[in-house]
Amino acid sequence: MAPALPPGTQAHMKKTHLYLLALIIAAIGFGAFAYKWKVLKFPVLPNEQTEIWEIQARVEFEPAKGPNKVTLQIPGNPPGYAVINENFLARDYGMSIESGKGSRAVQWQIRRARGTQALYYRATVYRDQHEVIDAAEPKPPTPKTYEEPFATARAGLLDAVREKSVDSASFAGELVRRLHDANPSQEVQLLTESFNSEHDRVKLSKELLADRQIAARIVYGLELVEQDTGSTLLPFLQVWDGERKTWRTLNAIDGVEGFPENFFLWSTAQKPVLVVEGNPDADIEFTAEQSLDDALETAKERLKAKDRNLIAYSLLDLPLDAQEVYRILLLVPIGAFVMLLLRNIIGIKTFGTFMPVLIALAFNWTGVIPGIILFATIISMGLLVRFYMERLKLLLVPRLTAVLIVVVLLMALVSVVSHKLDQPVGLNVALFPMIILTMTIERVSVAWEERGAGYAISQALGSLVIASLAYLVMKEPHLQHLIFVFPELLLVLFAITLVLGRYSGYRLTELFRFRALVKDPIAESPGDKAGP
């Protein structure tokens, strides 16, 4: 049989167990909060707004006789932005969305069409700082053979570029700048003499890089400018960096690395952005418009678009009336924690344990000063009735029932009188918990009889002080927002409560009360009084 542990060791083990449990609970609460804040992008401030963009692509073309099929590349998972809503407008057209490796497209089909056709794609996006990682390394391109003098011109241009570069990205940047030089070399003039568009130059850059087995691709995007209309997609050149294992983006005109600040990547598919079968002259126009929206609503919409289950089991998915109820209920632990600090640490005495918290909730509708006046009025009038009933020698339950009836009548009377006096705050007196008022009247009267009026009044004042301070804390809008959006923070409060539950030391009011007992032991030593 194992020997029993000393009592001190057992107490120490219990305390260690408590602290470890509190630490685990607090870590869970903080972890859930950090995940929702940093990953799911829930706002930590009330009324926080986020930048929203409405992007629209308008396709216009003259239909061919017979069937028509339109394929438009659309955004997938652009870096720096998140698509939270999409709308497609194409009357009488069939529609399907096709997703492939690095591409996403909408396809419209119609058997017959008459007159000019206009098809629309509209997306709601907002800033979401995340990076898209291309894990798959592309295969090195296979160089092609070209006829003279183009083969010599290409080789000469690439040799000159190589002398002023150190890696694939700098090589591509120097090549792009030479192709757009205001005074081009003879090689560039020969290679670009038949070019009619910027896309042709970007395509040439990609083909020239393939001659040196550098993998490159052309991507398209839109620079978001407020109230921008009639925009077109801008081509960018991306070069694979084998050392960093990532695509490095270059401006297709000046070779500067990186996207512009407000650049929205539309498509990385190595396909034309728009294909209208049998109609190469189809036109596409882009429009971007900025607005501001509530950050919480934006986060909710983003989660719904990403995974409906992420928000299906949260308070944010409840009906609005139920959400309003929980906005209040979640504040009760906050008020109870304030009461815990003021009672167990400060040492303020109250009637009841949770009566001040419930009174603080009623202050949400009445305010502190009017609430205290209403509370004091009802308690005072109720005490008069209670003292009178003491002479009737009623038993406890009948006495409480009688006081409750009187309390309800007093509340109704206060409301009617305040309404006649054009004081609407009195109408909110009904929000005070009737049972709590009844029990408070009973406790005040008992304390008055047993320990005197001073003790009873001090207890009542302590209850009002705690209720007022709890109300001020619970009324703080930032705290209300945090607790409703991140209810897991109550686990942190729970952990602190567990730790404080073992505190049995002096309260601050007791230190002040017994300060006269604290004396200097040296000054009172008998040796100080004796002579040498």
Image: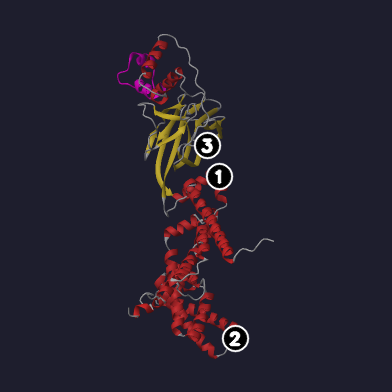
**Neighbours of disc 2 within 10 Å: few (<14), some (14-19), many (20+):** few
Assign a secondary structure to mark 2: loop
Query: Left of 192 or right of it: where is 135?
Result: right
**Depth check, front residue: 335 or 16:** 16
Around disc 3, counting alpha carbons within 10 Å, would you say few (fewer than 14), some (14 to 19), or many (20 or more)? few
Q: Residue type at mark 1: give it.
A: Asp
Q: Nearer the viewer, residue 23 or 383?
A: 23
From the image, state whether disc 2 or disc 3 is nearer to you: 2
Determine whether the residue tagged by mark 3 lies in a helix, strand or loop: loop
Q: Nearer the viewer, mark 1 or mark 3?
A: 1
Instruction: Give the SS element for disc 1.
Output: loop
Residue 14 can be seen in this image: yes
Distance from disc 2 to disc 3, alpha carbons, whole Å, reads: 79 Å
Q: Which mark is residue 395?
A: 2
Name the amino acid, label 2: Leu
Residue named by callout 3: 91
Question: Which residues make up the magenta segment?
Answer: 172-200
Amino acid type indicated by mark 3: Arg
Residue 520 x, y percent position in the rendering: 37, 75
Mark 2 or mark 1: whose residue is earlier in sequence = 1
The part of the image, by quadrant, that contains residue 52 is: top left
Q: Which residue is mark 1?
A: 307
Q: Work out which residue is located at the far front of the displayed protein and give it.
A: 532
**Residue 406, percent from left and from top:** 52, 82
Compared to residue 130, the image places residue 174 above or below, namely above
Q: Looking at the picture, how far across and down is residue 67, in whole percent? A: 56, 27
